[in-house]
Amino acid sequence: MVEQYTYAVSRIHARELDLLSSSDLEQLLICPDFETALKYLTEKGYGIKDNYRSFEELEKDETEKMWELINELIPDKTPFETLLRQIDFHNLKAAIKSVFTAEEAEGYFLRGGTVEPQVILNAVKIKNYSELPEFLSGTAVEATEKFAETGDGQECDIYIDRRCLETILSEGTASDVSIIKDYAELFVALSDIKIAARGALTKKSKGFMQRALAECETLDVDTLAAAAGKSINDVYKYLEHTNYKEAAEKLSVSMSEFEKWTDNKIMDLIKSQKSNPFTVAPIFSYILAKQNELKAVQIILSGKKNTLPDELIRERIRDLYV
């Protein structure tokens, strides 16, 4: 297995040369319009065809290219499933809402998860969850019962979102790869902070916050829930005494500034894995780096599409892996 990782990591390092740099993003930013920006990306090797009309189509093809490479190098996707759980749980939410509201779900499904969306949808439709993996089946049963009893889509959403975070943390903790453990803890903690801040700003109760937040090692979620149930300033005060003191500063500026900071924190975490050729860690890091790159590209293209000033777009761009 060490030999397999050594070869795979060498291939990944070669592909890192194709990741966009800060200067590439600057070139993308100074493109005069959305269409020119899309063309610039295809000329840089993005996608699989010469012309795209939307970022969503380009993102889909670029993501599929990345996973084709990963599957070629490491056929067993188990080490990377932590990164795919958000897609699986998102698709469960889409399936439940579709069944209970008779709204077409296809447009809301995301591709690339570990469970085919149609499998999830069929399970919810016939109330037979035996075809779903264990990490999803229990959540599906509980969430569908909640929705059937209350018709409260928001309560269903926060339950599924919390179960998603709990699953990511549980799987990350069980991993023997340190970067996956560290990523899972950091991701869940940062997600909890974001949930608490939004809850405080929208005047959610302490009870609501307790139902929404997921336990993790680096935060006391009971204290965080109590703070969020009072005010955003109480959230800031609590964070001052945690490992995430800087989060309070970023949140006081804007939610956008906080989200940029969280993405940069994850990039800081994975950059240390570039020179570790004997484990799956550099490949895991490459996937996160590509996802972060796509997020930066989306910010620029969205700004171009909405004719935002370049300086405003530039302020929102995340740090890159390369």
Image: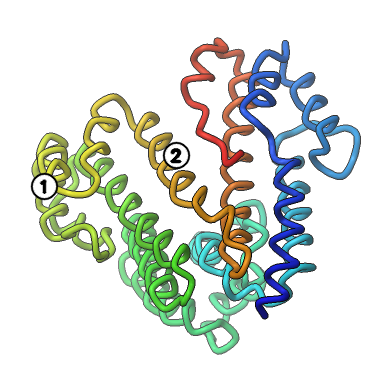
Give the residue pinned by disc 1. Answer: 227
Q: Amino acid at mark 2?
A: Asn
Q: Quick one: which residue is furthest to the right in this view?
A: 50
Q: Amino acid at mark 1?
A: Ala
Residue, x 49% and y 51% (percent of image)?
272
Residue 160 picture location, percent across and down: 39, 65
* Front tag of 2 and 1: 2
Left/right placement of residue 276 relative to residue 207 reads right
> Quick one: quadrant of the N terminus?
bottom right
Left/right placement of residue 187 relative to residue 242 reads right
Identify which residue, 320 or 297, lies in the foreground: 320
Residue 198 picture location, percent across and down: 28, 41
Helix, strand or loop at label 1? It is helix
Give the residue pinned by disc 2. Answer: 264
**Crowdedness near tag 2: few (<14), some (14–19) or many (≥20) residues, C-alpha within 10 Å:** some
Answer with mark 2 or mark 1, whichever residue precedes in sequence: 1
Residue 31 sits in which quadrant? top right
Q: CA distance from mark 2 to mark 1?
A: 25 Å
Q: Quick one: which residue is furthest to the bottom in this view?
A: 130
Residue 22 sits in which quadrant? top right
Residue, x 71% and y 35% (percent of image)?
55
Q: Which mark is residue 296?
A: none
Q: Is residue 195 above or below residue 71?
A: above
Q: Is residue 175 above or below residue 192?
A: below
Residue, x 53% and y 19% (percent of image)?
313
Helix, strand or loop at label 2? It is helix
Identify which residue, 260 or 3, lies in the foreground: 3
Residue 167 picture location, percent across and down: 41, 71
**Crowdedness near tag 1: few (<14), some (14–19) or many (≥20) residues, C-alpha within 10 Å:** many
> Quick one: quadrant of the C terminus?
top right
Residue 301 sits in which quadrant? top right
